[in-house]
Image: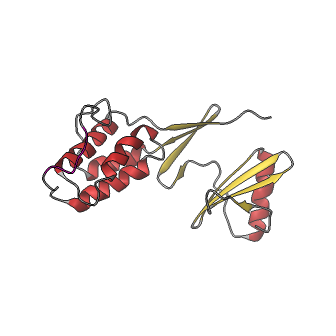
Amino acid sequence: MSLGFVETQSDTSLFSYHRGSDTAYLLLYVDDIVLTASFARFLQQIIAALQREFAMTDMGQLHHFLGISVTHCVGGLFLSQRQYTLDILERAGMSACKPCSTPIDLHSKLSTDGAPVADATQYRSLAGALQYLTFTRPDIVFAVQQICLYMHDPREPHLAALKRILRYLQGSLSLGLTMRRSPPA
């Protein structure tokens, strides 16, 4: 804050700094910082100012943060949780499952019917893991939201829907989120 960063209204961990046409964003998570700025020289000035205030190490370009892999590509960044997805599939015992082409069966509707699942804790754990995966996989948001509606009392049809999402993920491991840089004004 003493350097001129202002806490954003949308996220208490995200801070922004504006000086003329220069802009910088700082994301703080425990003892990790992700910092970006509109120009490399401006970014280096901010890093130097932060290093005068705090003991910190510049780790260079962002490659991995909170389980999200960051790949720098022409015009932007590609965010992926491929390894996280593989870990979820393994936890569910579905590492070798047959993939399917959609995350949800459009011809059926979930209800409260069916036998209770054998392990409700595992269902909740997997559903929570899928929720975190939606950060880079907006294609599964609706399907995950549907299974999360039944976390309080999961039934076998809900587990089948969760497994379908996992089968879809098995067949779409290379997908992620591309963030394009906007051209300079």
Which quadrant of the view contains residue 123? bottom left
Q: In the rendering, at what x and y percent does residue 81 appear?
A: 44, 45
What residue sits 78% from the left and 60% below the top?
48
Relative image position of residue 73 (x, y in whole percent)? 60, 34
Query: Colour mode?
Result: secondary structure
In which quadrant is the C terminus drawn?
Answer: top right
For image coordinates 36% across by 53% down, the residue present is 129
Range drawn in magenta: 109-114
Residue closest to the eye, 1 or 84: 1
Q: Is 27 positioned to the left or the right of 82 in the image?
A: right
Front residue of this view, candidates 151 and 138: 151
- Does residue 175 lie above or below 38 as drawn? above
Instruction: Say if the magenta span includes residue 20.
Output: no
The residue at the point 44 percent across, 41 percent down is 137
Q: In the picture provided, is 171 more to the left or to the right than 35?
A: left
Decide if residue 45 is on the left or right side of residue 160: right
Visible residue check, residue 95: no
**Number of callouts in the render?**
0
In this orientation, does residue 138 appear? Answer: yes
Residue extending furthest toward the left: 115
Nearest the viewer among 153 and 5 is: 153
Magenta stretch, main secondary structure class: loop
Residue 3 position (above or below residue 181): below
Residue 145 appears at what percent x and percent y? 37, 47
Give percent across and percent down for residue 171: 32, 33
